[in-house]
Amino acid sequence: MINAALLKQNGEKIGDIQLSLEVFGVEDNQQAIYEVIKAERAGMRQGTQKSKTRAEVRGGGRKPWRQKGTGRARQGSIRSPQWRGGGVVFAPVPRDHSIKINKKVVRLAMRCALSSKLRENAMIILDDLQLENFKTKSLVEVLSNVQANGKILVVSTEVNPNVELAGRNLPNVSVQTVSHISVYDMMNASSLVITKDAIARYEEVLR
């Protein structure tokens, strides 16, 4: 087991929390992290880009001029790619960019990401995270109390409307739940602010 500090919202330390070595004590596996992040970023692509080839552009069925005798280059259609209004060579078409990846690799990458944040002292564990209102100022005060800097990722077990609305106007803050967070989000954050319940959920799912 690994001991880590457990804080209140006001930054006061109330004790230590024991973390599982199987989840928070894993050595870095750069290949697993790379493969998962590549798959996650590929899944973000819409794949809806579309242009028309010369066969799909309307018109151009008649030969613009005769083959020989005009002094100009031979042309078969005014919808050829070299013509204005013509088709596109190797035009992009709608496609699925998703990459298949094994669930075991995803879980391994998430364990590596959590472990790296703990080793880098970039993980801040809170006893609970509750706001009386949805004002951005309230969340800024909490993050300042726990000394969270840079790109901040706030993770909890369930959606908290006040926390989510308070963090919406902060460009460097992302509020996520355990079930929706990705390895890319985890590695892209400078500070990870996570609740005690979210720690327990990760230890339950990732073991």
Image (cartoon, helix red, strand yellow):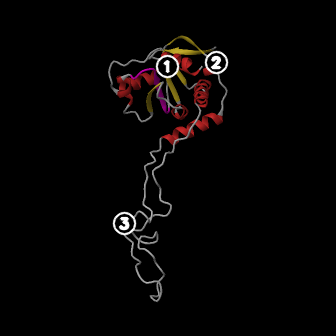
> In x, y percent, where is residue 174?
44, 31
Residue wearing tag 2:
21
Please, what secondary structure does the residue beneath circle 2 have?
Answer: helix
- Disc 1 marks a residue whose amino acid type is Ala
Image point (57%, 28%), residue name: 110
Q: Earlier in the sequence, mark 1 or mark 2?
A: 2
Which numbered mark, 2 or 3, is in the foreground of this view? 3
Mark 2 is surrounded, within 10 Å at the Cα level, by few (under 14), some (14 to 19) or many (20 or more) other residues, namely some
Q: Is residue 152 magenta?
A: yes
- Disc 3 marks a residue whose amino acid type is Arg
Magenta stretch, residue numbers: 150-159
Q: Nearer the viewer, residue 18 or 178?
A: 178
Please, what secondary structure does the residue beneath circle 1 have?
Answer: helix
Mark 1 vs mark 2, CA separation in Å: 16 Å
Mark 3 is surrounded, within 10 Å at the Cα level, by few (under 14), some (14 to 19) or many (20 or more) other residues, namely few
Q: Is residue 9 magenta?
A: no
The correct choice, above or below, for 45 with respect to 84 in the image is above
Q: Which mark is residue 92?
A: none
In the rendered structure, the answer to whether residue 9 lies left or right of residue 188 reads left
Please, what secondary structure does the residue beneath circle 3 have?
Answer: loop
Mark 3 vs mark 1, CA separation in Å: 57 Å
Residue wearing tag 1:
198
